[in-house]
Image (cartoon, helix red, strand yellow):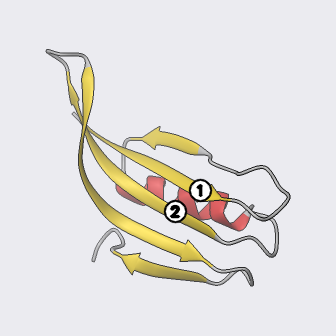
């Protein structure tokens, strides 16, 4: 079974780091949730987000990370720059 993990990481001087994460069943949904989390980062903070494809090994009850097809950076002004991929690309 394939799943999609979305994550962001951010931190500004004097603030606690923000690192939300989630798992969903579709890459477009993971991208949307990652972007929502990026836009929630406080102004002035730089953040990075990515989506990773996971494979659930039912026989081992573990997840294997297969690929990171999406990676973005949000600058301190809030501009998001796609470094790699988007669903449908």
**Label 2 crowd (10 A; few <14 / some 14-19 / many >=20):** many
Q: Quadrant of the C terminus?
A: bottom left
Side of 89 where 28 appears, left or right: right
Residue at 51 percent of width and 62 percent of height: 49
Residue 19 lies, in percent from the top left, at: 62, 48
- Name above or below for residue 35 compared with residue 60: below
Work out which residue is located at the far front of the displayed protein and give it.
Answer: 13
Distance of mark 1 from mark 2, alpha carbons?
6 Å
Rendering quarter of residue 12? bottom right
Side of 23 where 55 appears, left or right: left
Residue beneath disc 1: 9
Residue at 14 percent of width and 15 percent of height: 59
Residue at 82 percent of width and 73 percent of height: 43
**Label 1 crowd (10 A; few <14 / some 14-19 / many >=20):** some
Rendering quarter of residue 78? bottom right
Residue 20 lies, in percent from the top left, at: 62, 46
Mark 1 vs mark 2, foreground winner is: 1
Cβ atoms at labels 1 and 2 below 8 Å apart: yes
Judging depth in this view, the residue of 13 and 10 nearest the camera is: 13
Residue beneath disc 2: 49
């Amino acid at each position: 079974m394939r799943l999609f993990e979305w994550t962001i990481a951010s931190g500004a001087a004097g603030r606690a780091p923000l690192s939300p994460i989630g798992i969903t069943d579709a890459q477009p949904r993971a991208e949307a949730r990652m972007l929502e989390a990026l836009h929630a980062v406080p102004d002035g903070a730089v953040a990075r987000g990515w989506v990773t494809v996971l494979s659930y090994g039912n026989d081992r009850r573990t997840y294997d990370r297969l690929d990171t097809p999406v990676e973005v950076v949000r600058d301190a002004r809030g501009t998001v720059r796609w470094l790699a991929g988007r669903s449908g690309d």
